[in-house]
Amino acid sequence: MGILDASPRVRAAALTAPPFLYTLLLLAFPLGAVILISFMTQQGVALDTTFTTANYQRIATEPIFGALIGRSLLVASLVTLVTVVLAYPVAYYVSFHVRPERKALWLFIITIPFWTSYLIRVFLWRIILGFNGVVNTALVSLGIVDEPLTFILYNLNSVIITLAHAYAVFAILPIYVALEKIDRSLLEAAQDLGENRLTTFLRVTLPLSIPGVVGALLIVFIPVIGDYVTPELMGGPGGRVAANMIQIQFLQLNNWPLGAALALVVMMVVGLVAALFGLVFFRWLRRRA
Amino acid sequence: MRRGRLLGIYTIVYLVFLFAPIALLPIFAFNDAAIIAFPLAGFSTRWFERLWTTPALHQALQNSLFIATVTAVLATLLGTCAARAASMARFPGKRAALGFIMLPIALPEIVIAVALLIVIRQVFDLPLTNWSVIAAHTLICVPFSIAILNGAFAALDPSLEEAAMDLGESRWSAFRLVTLPLVMPGIVSSLLICFIISMDDFVLAQFLTGANPTLPVYIYSLTRFVDSLPLIMALGTILVTLSLTLLVIAEWFRRRGAARAGLKTSGGLL
């Protein structure tokens, strides 16, 4: 009896198997290898496979690693906050003020920049914010400033602008989905009961959209903390973050065990932040219920 | 509706912020100056002509096209399996298995890149080739493929396939003749989106590319030379135009598929 004649359950399981095995083989197994290698050491070109926590000790004791991880957390938190705060009104506008038959088109337009080369977009921000860039030449020629502004390139500001642009869609979509789910009659009821527009928003719409906001915060925070391209190209000399150090350990210094350990530490920090955040959110939900 | 108007203005400003960088691409790509700055120097196609005569670029483009094509096919095949399974009978562990398959989009790309690099070089001691990039791109494209195809399969009426089988078709031919044509728009859409993701990816390619770089890795290497910035603008113009064209076609197919299944379209491709 072939698999095609098997029961629906068996056929569903058989169909799940190829993508599942692919992910197992190319994700779970490699992540296991990362954990393993992080407990080894690099001796010149060779790998010393004796079990040791030396890499983790280095990360814990040498101040550079702590500083980089702290910087990663700072950059990722600021970017996440800026991205979500800027994105919320856009999601709100599309959900509440765009006619239903036009919503799909609006969302399509908002997602367009996301599908264009990330690297090219980073370059374009360099051109826009540069010393002789679009912003500065415009400001100087309009006479608004006497000489080009220097606080907008190769520092934290330029990194935040570029990343807030890169991850905008990740923030807009979850908030939009949450706003769409809100029963509109609740808003009418609130206004019938004497709430004005602002208090309706603050006491009904905003709390009901919080799950989307939480989703947006996480979905922006996680990829941003792993981003090394923007900090390298936009951050200037002091702009490096932990992800840059991971990249350097692997592609330049050839100390893979140390790079692996650092990647795992960063992942654990992300997990910890996400868990803490989830806990606060859960508490908040329970208090409201 | 004063509040609505204020919000509308804000949204327009935000859209300008979203699109401004891309809008600058063609302006500088056709600008007759080696320095990227205003004021503009005049119209020129010389940067495009230089692209035409740069062999290293052609090699990189060829690699990227090969990688993106194979990735699109593999990821869509695997994505079709998962999306089809998701619409079928429950079995123990199904939700966990499907959730696990979606995991690659919840991880920072650098972690996936590092993990695959270690396995390929340290565990198996294999050389890095285009296939290592394909393996990685397929991994991150499968979740996108599933997200696109889920809609197509979920909207399908299972009684159609049963009817075909009652009329004497085998299970496979019922799938091929009835289901496949109905989900075909979703499949085309998935192929195009996976192609775009693979063409645009830089992080995985930088870690896993072999002796021959992909297009984004090549572009990155150009950034060390100031005089090649206009070249990047010209190349970027071509790439963005390609992405946008494929994206519009993908969205058109996705909507057609949704319409065929009798669904109201809502939302974009994500």
Image (cartoon, rainbow, N blue to C red):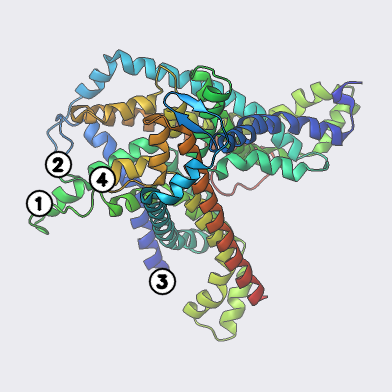
Q: Tell me: A195 left or right of A282.
A: left
Task: For the C terminus of chain A, give its image quadrant.
Answer: bottom right
Mark 4: which amino acid?
A: Gly
Dot in front, 1 or 3: 1
Badge 1 crowding class, 10 Å Cα cut-off, few under 14, some 14 to 19, many 20 or more, is few
Toward the viewer: A10 or B171?
A10
Label 1: state its secondary structure. helix
Mark 2: which amino acid?
A: Phe
Mark yes or no: residue B108 visible: no
Q: CA distance from mark 3 to mark 2?
A: 37 Å
Do tags 3 and 2 sit on the same chain? yes
Q: CA distance from mark 4 to mark 3?
A: 40 Å
The first of marks 4 and 1 along the sequence is 1
Toward the viewer: A60 or A232?
A60
Return the residue at label 2.
B38
Disc on res. A236: 4
Do tags 4 and 3 sit on the same chain? no
Return the residue at label 1.
A141
Badge 2 crowding class, 10 Å Cα cut-off, few under 14, some 14 to 19, many 20 or more, is some
Q: CA distance from mark 4 to mark 2?
A: 23 Å
In the rendered image of this protein, does residue A229 appear above or below residue A252?
Answer: below
